[in-house]
Image (cartoon, helix red, strand yellow):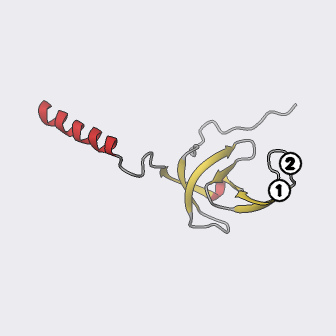
């Protein structure tokens, strides 16, 4: 029985923003969807797209050609930082920021 290799101090985590530094997708950035630690690979959103031919099944009646993200080796990506949690300001977010400013103003 073989043990699965994992990286204890792995710098890249799910949800991080990474940049591809080599390969056909060089220079592109994206968010990490999955980490395949046994193979030292990551799956990045909308990068390294592959076509998979699927047979019709009960859940997928049509079958056909499906596009999905392929994996990229960890050595070919560099961490850019964490992906932003909120990309668009909502009214609640604006109110929270405004209330924090008021509290800071009262405290000072």
Pointer 1 with pointer 2, Cβ within 8 A: yes
Disc 1 target residue: 63
Residue at 82%, 51% (x, y): give it.
61
Front-most of 17 and 61? 61
The x, y position of residue 48, in whole percent, is 68, 62
Q: Is mark 2 on a helix, strand or loop?
A: loop
Residue at 29%, 44% (x, y): give it.
94
Image quadrant assignment for residue 4: top right
Front-most of 14 and 54? 54
The residue carrying pointer 2 sits among few (fewer than 14), some (14 to 19) or many (20 or more) residues within 10 Å by Cα, namely few
Residue at 64%, 61% (x, y): give it.
47
Q: What element carries label 1?
A: loop
The x, y position of residue 105, in whole percent, is 13, 37
Residue 40 in view? yes
Classify 46 as above or below 81.
below
Spatial CA span between label 1 and label 2: 7 Å
The x, y position of residue 22, in whole percent, is 64, 65
Residue at 20%, 39% (x, y): give it.
101
Disc 2 target residue: 57
Residue 108 in view? no
* Residue 107 as seen in the image, left or right of residue 55: left
The x, y position of residue 106, in whole percent, is 12, 32
Image quadrant assignment for residue 62: bottom right
The residue carrying pointer 1 sits among few (fewer than 14), some (14 to 19) or many (20 or more) residues within 10 Å by Cα, namely few
Classify 29 as above or below 61.
below
- The quarter of the image holding the C terminus is top left
* Residue 71 as seen in the image, left or right of residue 95: right
Q: Which of marks 1 and 2 is nearer the N terminus?
A: 2
- The quarter of the image holding the N terminus is top right
């Amino acid at each position: 029985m073989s043990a699965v290799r994992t990286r204890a101090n792995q710098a890249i985590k799910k949800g991080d923003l990474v940049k591809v530094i080599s390969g056909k997708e060089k220079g592109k950035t994206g968010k990490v969807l999955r980490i395949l630690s046994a193979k030292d690979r990551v799956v990045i959103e909308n990068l390294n797209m592959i076509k998979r031919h699927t047979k019709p099944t009960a859940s997928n009646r049509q079958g056909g050609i499906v596009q999905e993200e392929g994996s990229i080796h960890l050595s070919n990506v560099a961490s850019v930082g964490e992906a932003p949690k909120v990309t668009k300001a909502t009214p609640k977010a604006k109110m929270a920021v405004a209330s924090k400013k008021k509290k800071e103003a009262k405290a000072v």
